[in-house]
Amino acid sequence: MTDTKVYFLDGGSLVLDGFHIFWNRGPGGEVRFPSYSVLIDHPEGRFMIDTGYDYDHVMKVLPFEKPIQSKDQTMPGALKLIGLEPKDIDVVFNSHFHFDHCGGNKYFPDARKICHRLEVPQACNPAPFEHLGYSDLSFSVEAAEARGVTDQLLPNATRANTTFEGVEGDFELAKGVHMIYAPGHAVGNYAVMIELANRRPMMLVLDAAYTRRSLETLCQASFHIDPVKGIESMHKIRKYAEDHDAELFFSHDMESFETYQTGTRFYS
Ligand SMILES: [Zn+2]
């Protein structure tokens, strides 16, 4: 799309064991990986895809993930780098509600919020093995109440300003911004393909495959609700990217992330 710009907002990094990142394959040992959000500055509005993790939440609930996040890597800090404030964002779309994808939602009380229709119910009542993934409920009064963690909410959070429009299947979020339903990692997980005027389309694989190696070897993370669907989603994304000659961008791949344009640099 003419005039569409895509910014990667660096949100710092976390650590997991290699056996979590590459489920049942490894190798084991600590792997530090990036966490980021994507701002699509589009003629139809400013769309934020995911909102990164909240440092204090991780230190309180999952300190073993050893967060490193500078002031410029917080959601308000990353926006400030490109001359914006949270109130400038029109729409927040969450690919799913794992803590490292929704920790900054609380800064956007006035934005429209959209996610798969099954993700809020899942955050309210996750599978037993999903509790740490869905541990930051500050994005939703409904979810925080359901899980008994209303202390996570900012004082300005209300049911009305944390209500999500539920979507399903593949659809266009804005012209040339294709939302690709990719369940498995989470029940309502999405990937995104963005068409741009001056380059190949960008395929944001997001958590359907953490790294390039994950997608190439069909090796998903150990965090998932349905690994069979997860494999189907990886096949779907590979075909979609191939059919559209899209460039692949990975959510938690430090080696790839170091080559991405971040800060004030953007894709258009
Ligand atoms: Zn995730």
Image (spheres, helix red, strand yellow):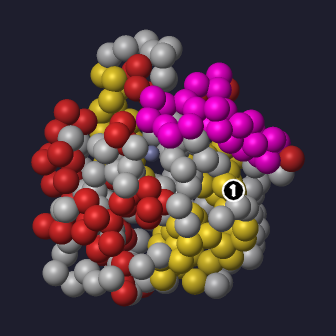
Tell me if mark 1 has few (under 14), some (14-19) or many (20+) residues whose alpha carbon lies within 10 angstroms of its own.
many
Q: Which residues, given as a range, are shown in magenta?
A: 217-242
Left or right side of 101 for 211: right
Residue pictured at 48% horizontal, 16% vertical: 24
- Location of residue 82 (image quadrant): bottom left
Can residue 61 be spotted in the picture?
Answer: yes
| As drawn, 204 above or below 67 | below
Verify whether residue 241 appears in magenta.
Answer: yes
Q: Give the residue displayed 51% in from the left and 47% down from the top.
A: 186
Please state the horizontal and vertical placement of residue 6, each as a whole percent of the image: 58, 65
User: Is residue 30 located in the magenta-colored stretch of the structure?
Assistant: no
- Looking at the image, can residue 213 be seen? no
Left or right: residue 225 compared with residue 2:
left
Q: Please name whichever residue, 29 or 97, is drawn nearer the observer in this view of the structure.
A: 97
Q: Amino acid at mark 1?
A: Ile
Q: Is residue 239 left or right of residue 109?
A: right
Quadrant, the C terminus: bottom right
Mark 1 within 8 Å of ligand 1, using the beta carbon? no
Q: Position of residue 15 (x, y in %)?
A: 30, 33
Image position, residue 257 (x, y; %): 48, 41
Front-lying residue, 69 or 56: 56
The secondary structure that most of the magenta stretch takes on is helix
Residue at image position (44%, 56%) is 122
For ligand 1, the image quadrant comes to top left
In the picture, residue 106 is in which quadrant?
Answer: bottom left
| Image location of residue 234, percent across then percent down | 68, 37
Mark 1 element type? strand
Q: Which residue is mark 1?
A: 180
